[in-house]
Image (spheres, rainbow, N blue to C red):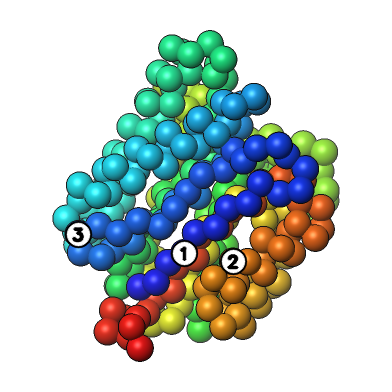
């Protein structure tokens, strides 16, 4: 497997409240993370950094993941621990009161991927069947779409598009969504913050990922495109390609 992460402040914001990364455990399995912090001042980047750091630390201590059940339990346990860490930090630091973060994290083995998420940072899969959004946004407009009160087209431009129904660190107890999917050789997994998806259509995202000569090229092209279209938000994405270990050095 080959994975890369890129984050960019964008053209408007003064600092980057996104965090994330690509991390390997002892068996070279990958944990990919994207977290999009919120809370004003410097609190957003504190929340997203705490989430990423907590998960990274636990992943380094993990020998291997052998089943979807184990992967799901791992994500649920450690994302909930990250939630507690952020929630307590906000109580102890007045300037961080009310901070929170989205998180989407994926455990990638050669046979399967297990995704855990909360908020509106997304996960997509590119395979022989096309391009699919794997996660479902925990947002007000998505709930209105699901209940038939809003069309998907109107949701794209709704004034309350950024209102989240759930986030990491804002409440003492949270429930996360988890899902396991299979993947095959040369499939791509893409995790990204809304700084990208608000500026780049799904078909464009798919095109850049599969047609670029490398993951690095895809990352840079997508970040540049989001910036060309305004770059009002921070932009972050992780891409993992299912390349067998024997082929990575070829």
Label 2 or label 1, whichever comes before in sequence order: 1
Secondary structure of the residue carrying numbered label 2: helix
State the image quarter where residue 36 is shown.
Answer: top right
The residue pinned by badge 1 equals 4
Secondary structure of the residue carrying numbered label 3: loop
Q: Where 159 sits versus 93, above or below?
A: below
Return the x and y of residue 63 as percentages of the image width and height: 16, 55
Q: Identify the image quadrant of the N terminus.
A: bottom left
The residue pinned by badge 3 equals 26
Q: Identify the image quadrant of the C terminus.
A: bottom left
Q: Where 91 sits versus 244, above or below?
A: above
Q: Which mark is residue 176?
A: none
Return the x and y of residue 8 as percentages of the image width and height: 63, 51
Q: Is residue 228 left or right of residue 217?
A: right
Return the x and y of residue 146 as percentages of the image width and height: 66, 48
Q: Is residue 50 left or right of residue 97?
A: left
Return the x and y of residue 102 as percentages of the image width and height: 53, 40
């Amino acid at each position: 497997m080959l994975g890369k992460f890129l984050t960019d402040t964008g053209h408007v914001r003064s600092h980057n409240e996104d965090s994330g990364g690509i991390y390997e455990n002892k068996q070279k399995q990958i944990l990919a993370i994207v977290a999009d912090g919120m809370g004003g001042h410097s609190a957003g980047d504190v929340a997203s950094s705490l989430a990423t750091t907590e998960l990274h630390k636990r992943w380094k201590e993990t020998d291997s993941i052998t089943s979807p059940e184990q992967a799901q339990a791992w994500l649920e346990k450690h994302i909930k621990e990250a939630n507690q860490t952020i929630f307590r930090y906000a109580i102890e630091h007045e300037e961080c009161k009310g901070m929170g973060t989205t998180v989407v994290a994926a455990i990638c083995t050669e046979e399967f991927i297990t995704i855990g998420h909360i908020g509106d940072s997304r996960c997509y899969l590119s395979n022989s069947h096309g391009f699919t959004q794997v996660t479902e946004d925990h947002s007000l407009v998505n709930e209105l779409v699901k209940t038939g009160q809003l069309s998907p087209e109107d949701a794209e431009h709704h004034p309350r598009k950024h209102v989240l129904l759930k986030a990491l660190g804002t409440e003492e107890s949270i429930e996360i969504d988890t899902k396991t999917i299979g993947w095959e050789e040369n499939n791509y997994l893409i995790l990204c913050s809304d700084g990208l998806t608000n500026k780049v259509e799904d078909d464009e995202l798919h095109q850049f990922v599969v047609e670029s000569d490398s993951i690095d090229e895809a990352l840079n092209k997508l970040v540049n495109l989001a910036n060309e279209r305004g770059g009002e938000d921070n932009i972050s994405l992780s891409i993992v390609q299912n390349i067998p270990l024997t082929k990575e050095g070829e």
